Image (cartoon, rainbow, N blue to C red):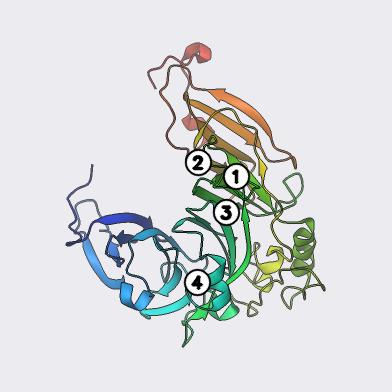
Amino acid sequence: RLPRRIPVGPSAATCFHALPGGDFVLVGLRSGEVRVLRLPAAPAGRWAWAPYSVPPDAAGSSDEVALLGAQPGARERRALVGFACGCLVLWDLPARRLVATSDQGREALAAVADCGGVTAAAWAGGSGLRLAAGYDSGDVVLWGLGAAAGPRWRAPPEPAGMVALQKLRCSGGPGPAEPVLQLAFAPPGRGAAPARAALFVLGGHAEGGMDCVSRLAFPPAAAAAAAAAAAAPGGPPAAAPGAGLAPLAVPPGAPGDGAAGGGDGPGWLPDGGLEPASPLPWFGSVRDFALVPPAGSPASGAPAFLVTATEFGQLHAHDLAEDAPRSLQIELHGCPDAACAVHVPFAPEALVLPPGGGGGGGG
């Protein structure tokens, strides 16, 4: 129950996103504006609108806001905004300045001319320089941002253009496809974890097909580049001839730089394009999915499982330790259709089962 109703003005809210730190929430409006709501320190405190916003005229689009996010490494300073027209922008809230936009440059505009609205987005790790976006057309576009748009303290004097590095479809064919519903990036793991970074996509399948999750893997060369970058204090290695996608330059010591000990720095940024989609084993129409890291690992680390919530109230845990994920079925007997899947970490001692371990339906 909300403590009180927060009016947003004449325009209806379309989406929201909690910024890191827990003090601010981005609120997207149908008018194309993004406002910032400041949360109270205590439940009885006063909810108030912060003096920061993303004005639609300055952002370059007056269409309704379709999605919101925050740039990794920038905490509450940078807002990622996706509009129903398909435009993506990165906005510096304190500086009140446009940092980067996909609505600039002939190549970028041509890449998404037939994609429709943007429907989902996921940052490719912690550098804040690679971004995957899904569209109404079922396409997935991998965008690159130059180092000037990285999560620095100061925004660049002029907005940087986003570069469309690759465009592909999960459906694998030229025919109509369903919209992309959700994207999630999985960084490369270490040891027994998967060695390759991957992008997981819900939707984007052939029109009329059943909702499923597909895996788009970065090529093995990206994993080799990661190891090289981790060992080199000067940052990522230069791209090999014909590599396709060169790692973007990151200033030494900047957030996400391997030299700064960021862990998921620019080294694993792909030096080759995403591979064709590989659907995960299908057990019913997927409503939602969540990546689950190993116990005791940070949420941003390489996931151990991908859990899907499917029709008929079923959960399926896909083991990602293998290059071809295998599935473990977890049936929720007597439950209605699952609507969403969210990973919520908890201490094992907090889970108390009734005597005999039964699953009586009262939980």
Q: Position of residue 255 (x, y in %)?
A: 58, 71
Q: Residue at x 65, y 46 (%)?
A: 215
| CA gap, disc 1 and disc 3 | 8 Å
Q: Which badge, 1 or 3, comes first in the chain's sequence?
A: 1
Residue at the far top in the pictured view: 356
What residue is disc 1 on? 293
Relative height, residue 230 to residue 183 (above, below): below
Gap between marks 4 and 1, in whole Å?
Answer: 32 Å
Whichever of labels 2 and 4 marks the residue nearer the N terminus, that label is: 4
Query: Can you identify the residue that label 3 sits on?
Result: 300
Q: Quadrant of the C terminus?
A: top left
Residue occupying the point 62% across, 48% down: 170
- Residue that label 4 marks: 102
Q: Are the residues flagged by discs 2 and 1 in contact, CB closer than 8 Å?
A: yes
The numbered mark, 3 or 4, whose residue comes first in the sequence reads: 4
Residue 141 falls in which quadrant of the image? bottom right
Residue flagged by tag 3: what amino acid is it?
Ser
Which circle's residue, 2 or 3, is located before the other in the chain? 3
Q: Secondary structure at mark 3?
A: loop
